[in-house]
Image: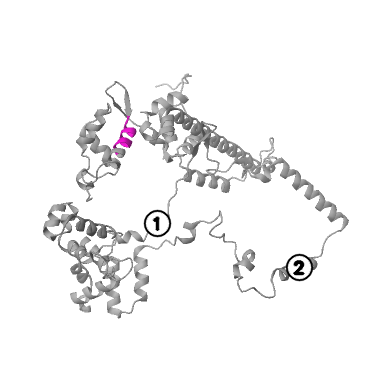
Amino acid sequence: MKASLVLKMGQNLTMTPQLQQAIRLLQMSTLDLQAEIQEALDSNPMLEVEDDNNSPASQAERATEQQINATQSNSGETQPDTQEQQVDSTDWTEQIPSELEIDTSWDDVYQSSASNIPSSNSEDWDFTSTTSVGVDLQSHLLWQLNLAKMTDSDRMIATVIIDSIGADGYLQESLEEMQDSFDPMQHIEMDEIEMVLKRVQQFEPTGIAARNLSECLLLQLNSLPSSTPWLTQAKTLCTEYLELLGARDYNQLMRRMRIKEEALKDIVQLIQTLDPRPGSAIESQEAAYIVPDVIVRKANNRWIVELNPDIAPRLAVNAQYADFVQRADNSADNTFMRTQLQEARWFIKSLQSRNETLLKVATQILDYQRGFFDYGPEAMKPLILAEIAEAVGMHESTISRVTTQKYMHTPRGIFELKYFFSSHVSTAQGGECSSTAIRAIIAKFVAAENPKKPLSDSKIAGLLEEQGIQVARRTIAKYRESLGIPSSTDRKQLL
């Protein structure tokens, strides 16, 4: 076959590096975006953060200050270092009084020089950063074990017991499995393990190292004062009739325990003060925060949406470094600087594009779901991605990226942008109702129900039908479960 050259014309869609970067930044969450910006600042010398020092007024002040310093340097009017040290020493001695008043505290006198840590009533105070130590449950229990007086053998057994405690505070292994884990030459008896287990169960939090729920609750009840009302009856219930309480079979409980309804109510209230998962009191993870991307507020009777100025710093090209770039110079250093300058401009433009797109989408959501902001989730309208995509002139995939892991701060709380999108349910009048609105109505019904006779899913479906909303019972159950609302049997309570 003879080789030949053929010229063809065609169209092909190619994603440039700039477009790839813009798409990548668009789908990032706030925390990921902040990390990406910091990485760009660290790697590209052409990028810098805009601040008040970069304003024209600040630049003029710095130029004036440099001119004054240059004039003083030329005239020889400089102060010796010894004089500055002497002034500082004099000022320091004047700040310390010779005698302290009785009511004067150390912090009142040495507050400025003690440390740079902000006080608890300061705006810069961060409770989580100063109190979170990242200690898990095992570390907390081992710390208490080190303070306990035990023999080496008992301490070894206690360490094995602590290692088998799960995050909820319960033992994950049986005592027989623990005994099998020891070396047969150590001759560890079951009585020793049970004795050490009782010692560990005295550690904090109360109820730790229990083998089941009944034992966990009994450990907490045993720690209460003996004068606690209904304490004996609560112990009896947790020992013998806990399954009936879980099934909410109150009639059977009253017959078995030979008590009246008011007495059972007091006993159940005492048990409800206990913690069925004592291990969860010791959290090893730091608190996670949601930083909103956009803020919606009402000003002059108008809803307005704006970007959160704290999510990302304002970036700019370093003018001093940019002046060093020579257009006609093809040296390696100049080529590197020219490349960095171009990447910095692309990065800034991609950030601007991300912010503009996010603001457009948030504004359209605000306009479409204005009823939610005025009246609450019950006024939410059905909304799909295609409607917002058509309104802003973008593709659905772009809207999906914008609304994922992006949050809106409103007077009603912080919501992910995807929260405002929902499917629709037909009404009797031929209209449409949002599934989010139906969930809000279900939650309202449950909140107002009689706790002794909670509403069943069929009853809720009937109440919705009275409002012209036709929803099947299984759909009600699905919505109820998504809201974390138990079934009517589990919601039943004593009066």
Please tell me how many numbered marks the rendered image carries.
2
| Marking on residue 85 | 2
Q: Is residue 136 left or right of residue 106?
A: left
Segment colored magenta: 434-442
Q: Residue furthest right?
A: 75
Residue 485 picture location, percent across and down = 27, 44
In the image, residue 226 sits, relative to residue 453, either above or below, namely below
The residue to which callout 1 is attached is: 285
Res. 209 visible in picture: no
Residue 263 is drawn in which quadrant?
bottom left
Please state which amino acid type lies under the numbered disc 1.
Gln
Residue 268 picture location, percent across and down = 23, 57
Our reading of the magenta stretch's main secondary structure is helix
How would you rate the neighbour count of disc 2 (Cα within 10 Å): few for under 14, some for 14-19, many for 20 or more?
few
Identify which residue is drawn at 59% across, 70% down. Answer: 105
Helix, strand or loop status at disc 2 = helix
Helix, strand or loop status at disc 1 = loop
Q: Is residue 138 left or right of residue 261?
A: right
Which of these two is toward me, 257 or 130? 257
In the image, residue 163 sits, relative to residue 269, either above or below, namely below
Q: Residues under labels 1 and 2: Cα distance?
A: 48 Å
Which of these two is toward me, 169 or 261? 261
Q: Quadrant of the N terminus?
A: top left
Identify which residue is drawn at 83% across, 60% down. Answer: 78
Query: For residue 169: magenta?
Result: no
Residue 226 is drawn in which quadrant?
bottom left
